[in-house]
Image: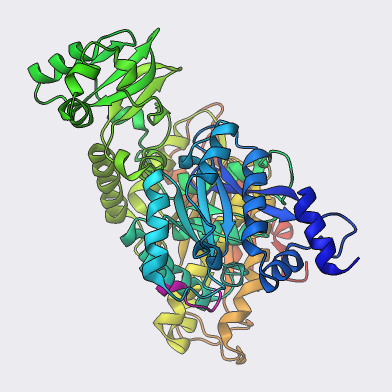
Amino acid sequence: MTQLDEFNHILDTQNIRMVYQPIVSLFDGSLFGYEALTRGPDNSTFHSPSVLFEFAEKNGYLYELEKLAREKAIQNSILQHKQQMLFINISSPVIFDPKFKAGQTLEVLQQRGLSPSNVVFEITERISIEDFTLAKKVLEHYRNQGYKIAIDDAGAGYSSLQAIAELQPDYIKVDRSLVQNIHKFKIKEYIMETFVTFAQKMNIHLIAEGIENEEEMMKLSRMGVHYVQGFLLGRPEPHAAVISERLTTMITQQKADYSPAGMTWTIGDIKAPIQTFELSTKISHVADYFTLNEVASGVVITSANKPIGLVMRERLFQQLAGQYGFSLFWKRSIESAMDPEPLVVDEFLQVEQVSQMAMSRLHNKLYDYVIITSNGFMSGVSSVQSILACITNVRLESARVASPLTGLPGNIQIHRELQKRASSNQKFSVIYADLDYFKWYNDLYGFQKGDQLLQFTADIIQQSVMAFAHSQDFVGHIGGDDYIILSHNDKPELLCEEIIRRFEQGVHLFYEGTTTRGVKDRQGNAVNSDGVTISLALVICDCKYQPITLEQISEAAAQLKKQAKSQKGSVYCSCDLLNGQADYRPVTEIKEVNSAH
C-alpha cells in the first residue's frame, strides 16, 4: 500500500482520534477550555500530526482532513459547561478554500448540544496569510455567527504582529519559544510586556503556550497574561483534565499577593437590584414595564427565584419594532424574547474575573447585564460600566500605595497586614529580607542593573512563597532592598532556605561575566565577600496567649538582621517570639545555604 493509499484509507474510515490539552485561567486557576489536537492511527506512518497534515497539504487534501478533525473535535468534545471554550486549529489555506462553507460546523455543534460561542478558530501564524482583506471577510462571517478567532504561534518569528493587527483576534496564543524560561531572560520578558500592552489596548486575551515549570507560570501571571497551556497544567488527553489543587492554590494566592490588603472586591460587592418576572409573563407586560420605567435597561426572568433568562430593553423594542412585531410577539410569553444564556455568576467571584468573562461574550452581548446569584438564587445584577469602574478604582488605589518598581504592596498594606496578624491568636512568621552590599553593586553597575537585581529578588521571594502555596501568605516591598514576608507555613525555616537557594542560583547572572572582587560595605570599607548576598531575619510569632506588638517584632528582627549580616554569605537567623519575649536561636544554628546545597 502506497502512502497515498494509506492516507485515503484514513480519510475514508475516519481513522483519526482527538486529544484535548487544557487551557487554565491565571486569574483563579479554573479550567477555561481545551485545544483539540489530532492524532493519526497508532503504529502508522501518519500517527504524528505534523506528518499527517504536511502530507495532506502537499497532496491537496488539507481541507478534507481539517474538516474531519473539526467534526471529530466537536463530536468528542469534553467541555463541562457553557462557559468553557473549545479551540480548533484551522490552517490559513483552508480559509480560502472554496469548499470551506458556512453552516457545516454549526450543524455538528447543534448535534452535540453546543453553540458557536463555545468555539475558537485557532489560525496558525506559521503559514503566511497573503490576502488579509479576503481573510477578514471570511472570518467576519464566522464572527457574526458567534465564533471567536485566535492567532496561534505569536512571537515565533513570523508576521504575527501584522496578522494580529489585520485580523484583530479575540485571543493571541504566544509561542513556546518566547515563554520558555521567561523568568530567566529579560529580553523575553520585554517582548512579552509588549504583547501584554498591545493586547490590553485592543481588548485581546493572551494565552501563553508551552508552560513546563511553575516559575514560568508565576512570572506570566505577574505580567498580566490571562491564560496558560502546557505540560505543567496537563498533557493532551481524550478525557477531561483535572488541574492540580496545588497549582490552583498558587495561582489564586499570586493574585491575592498582588491585590492591596482589603482591596479585593467580589462581584457581590457591586451588585444592584433589578426587576424580575416569571417565565409565564407576557411580553406585553414586560414592554409596559419598560415604558413606565424609562431608566430600566433590563429585567431578569426567573423560575423559583433562580435566573433563567435576561431581557434588555433595547433588544426587546427592536424585536417589537420590526414588521409584524407586535402581532407576532405581543401576546406570547417572555420566554420567546429573552436571552436564555445570559452570563450568570456567583456573588463571591472576583470582579476582575467577571470582567474577563463579560468581555469574552458575543459582540452584541458585551453590554448586557451580568446576573449575580447567591447560593444559586437571584441576588442582583451588575452593568459592565460598574465592573470597569470598580476595576479602575482598585487599580488606581493599588498603584498609589504599591512599590512602583516591583508592584508589591507597600508600607500601608504591610502595616495593615502585620497589625491584623499580630492581634490575632494564630501563629505566624515574619521574614525580613534585605541585600548585603547592594550599594556597592548599584554604584559599580549602575541604577538600571540595580533595579533589575531588586526585581529579581522580589521575583525569587514570591516564587519561594508560591512553592509552599499557603493561601494567607503575604509579600511586601518595604523599600529599597528591604522586603517582608508574612507566612503561616508550618516550617518557615524551609521557606528561608528556599529563598536563599533561588537567590544564590541566579544572582551570579547579574555580574555580566566579570569578577566580584573589591566588594565594599556602605562606608566604603573592603569586605570579604564574593558579591551581593541576602540576609533573612525570621521571627516566629506565637500569639496564642497574648497579642504581639509591632514594636516587639521590629526589635527582634533588628537583632536577627545584625546577627545575619555578621556572617559571610547568604544566611538566615531566627527566634521565637512568645508573650512579647524573644528566644533567640544560638548562633551555631545559623545556616548558610549556597547553590550547591
Image quadrant where residue 533 sits: bottom right
Residue 249 in percent (x, y) is at 59, 41
Image quadrant where residue 583 sits: top right
> 26 and 576: which one is in front?
26
Residue 493 in percent (x, y) is at 68, 51
Residue 65 in magenta stretch: no
Looking at the figure, which quarter contains the C terminus? bottom right
Query: Image point 51% across, 86% down: which residue?
Result: 525
Is residue 489 in view from this perspective?
yes
Q: Is residue 299 left or right of residue 32?
A: left
Q: How many marks?
A: 0
Residue 134 in percent (x, y) is at 39, 67
Looking at the figure, which quarter contains the N terminus? bottom right
Q: What is the magenta range?
A: 156-162
In this rendering, the answer to whether 375 lies above or below 497 is above
Q: Is residue 570 left or right of residue 93?
A: right
> 530 and 249: which one is in front?
249
Residue 448 in percent (x, y) is at 41, 81
Residue 160 in magenta stretch: yes
> 387 and 213: which one is in front?
387
